[in-house]
Structures are given as C-alpha cells and as structure tokens.
Image (cartoon, rainbow, N blue to C red):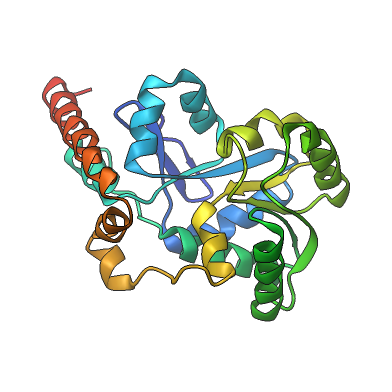
C-alpha cells in the first residue's frame, strides 16, 4: 500500500485499488502544483462501480495507479476505507469539484479546453461558464460525439491550444481511457473526464441537492430514471463481502 504524502495528498488502497485522501483545504495547492510540473496529470472521480471494475480490468487499474489524483465520490468507498483502517478519504461531489477546479484555474489565470456533448449543449455550456468565470480562458471546444477518424485532428487541436485543463464529458468513447491513451500527444497539464457536469452546465439537469449527496442517497434519483440500476445492489453486496474478507485477512 502506498502511503506517500505529496502536496497534502495521501494515497491509500481500497481493495488493492488506489484512492487519494485530499483534504479540501489542500486542494488548491495540489492543483496549482500540477500547473507547472511538466507532467500529464489525470484526475479520476471514482465511483464504487469504477473501483470494482478496476479490480477485474487491469488496464483501468493501471490508469488509476498512474493518475495524479483518484478522488472517491461514493460513500461506500469512504466507509470501506475507514472499515479497513486505511484512513478516511474526503468525498467530493463531482459537480462541485469541477466548479472549484475551474475557480482555481480562473484565480491563477489559467485556461480550459471543453470536449463534450452535442454542439448546441456545448455552446450553452461555454456561454454559462464564461458568465460564471469571466477570468477563465476558454481556449477551445469540440463536441464529444465525434467519429474515430476525427480523433487525431481533435488531439492535435487540443495540443495546439495547450490548455491548463482538458475537461471532457459526454460522448467521449472510452471516457478516462481515451484521455490516457492520448496522453503522449498532449502537452503537460490537467485532464479530467466528468460527464454529469456538462449536463448541469447546459441546463439539462439540476445540480444534486446537498441533502441527497451528504446522506448517500444519490442512487434513488438514478434508480427511478433507470430501474435496471437495481441490479447494482449485487455489486454493492460483493464489495462489502470483499471489504470484510480484506479486514479479516488484514490485507
């Protein structure tokens, strides 16, 4: 288990999957440290389903291990880490994390490239972001639903724009994997995939309420939107069985 502390970040393992403990008060220092370190800095917001996928998918696990930040957004991950006595990570709400990240970029005169959604939604997102963050430099945008043949041109456009942050979302095939696979083609910077934030930026969805988030009830709105999510309860049960076994075996 890697307990390295860098810029206030502590990396732990939950079921052999890396998770970072990042105190909210350390976030700005950590992010600004990425601006000038000359590296590819990928941030991954990890849900319980992602953690379990990483256990059976070596490629995704490798992406997480090589990411600059792996931030948990599921309450079960927080509870699991505490039960395993590995520490208690802070749980970030995806939309609020992105808003804070953009605020840090604006404060330090940095830039962002937007890669997500259909054309109309992307334009609305850009307009709303310009209104909310007038000092933020938006150096480019491209729709997320692009053909594979266009990928090389998009990567080149991003490289030429050289944004501090590449914020990607809906329509990117492979999501975090697409960012990682093209990492050597990009200039150094910060890279994040967050699908749901663009839905809020363009007004298609409302931001999740604090009450629902803080009590870990975000499953219920998603369940009513898609009842088939009920079967994810088996993933939840399997996760806690593994956590119990890891605790007993003291791994």
Q: Residue drawn at (60%, 55%), measured in percent from left and top? A: 31
Q: Position of residue 89 (x, y in %)?
A: 34, 49
238 or 147: which is nearer to us?
147
Q: Quadrant of the N terminus?
A: top left
Q: Is residue 12 visible?
A: no
Q: Residue drawn at (68%, 62%), measured in percent from left and top? A: 122
* Horizontal side, residue 180 vs residue 119: left or right: left
Q: Residue drawn at (65%, 37%), measured in percent from left and top? A: 179
**Which corner quadrant of the image does residue 86 belong to?**
top left
Q: Quadrant of the C terminus?
A: top left
Q: Position of residue 232 (x, y in %)?
A: 25, 39
**Which corner quadrant of the image does residue 137 belong to?**
bottom right
Q: Position of residue 73 (x, y in %)?
A: 37, 51
Q: Is residue 207 visible?
A: yes
Q: Position of residue 178 (x, y in %)?
A: 64, 34
98 or 88: which is nearer to us?
98
Q: Residue drawn at (71%, 38%), measured in percent from left and top? A: 39
* Horizontal side, residue 160 vs residue 14: left or right: right
* Horizontal side, residue 198 vs residue 148: left or right: left
Please state the total of marks drawn on the protein image. Answer: 0
């Amino acid at each position: 288990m890697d307990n390295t502390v860098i810029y206030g970040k502590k990396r732990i393992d939950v079921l052999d999957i890396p998770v970072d403990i990042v105190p909210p008060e350390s976030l700005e220092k950590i992010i600004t440290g990425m601006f000038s370190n000359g590296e590819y800095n990928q941030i991954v917001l990890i849900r319980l389903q992602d953690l379990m996928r990483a256990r059976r998918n070596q490629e995704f696990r490798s992406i997480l291990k090589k990411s600059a930040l792996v931030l948990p957004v599921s309450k079960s991950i927080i509870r699991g880490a505490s039960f395993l006595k590995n520490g208690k990570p802070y749980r970030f709400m995806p939309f609020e994390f992105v808003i804070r990240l953009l605020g840090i970029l604006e404060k330090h005169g940095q830039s962002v490239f937007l890669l997500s959604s259909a054309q109309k939604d992307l334009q609305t997102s850009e307009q709303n972001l310009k209104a909310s963050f007038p000092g933020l430099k938006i150096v480019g945008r491209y729709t997320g639903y692009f053909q594979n043949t266009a990928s090389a041109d998009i990567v080149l456009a991003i490289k030429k724009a050289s944004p501090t942050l590449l914020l990607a979302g809906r329509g990117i095939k492979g999501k975090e994997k697409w960012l990682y696979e093209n990492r050597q083609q990009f200039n150094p910077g910060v890279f994040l995939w967050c699908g749901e934030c663009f839905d809020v930026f363009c007004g298609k969805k409302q931001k999740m309420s604090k009450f629902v988030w803080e009590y870990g009830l975000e499953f219920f709105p998603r369940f009513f939107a898609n009842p088939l999510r009920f079967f994810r309860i088996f993933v939840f049960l399997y996760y806690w069985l593994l956590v119990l076994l890891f605790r007993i075996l003291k791994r």
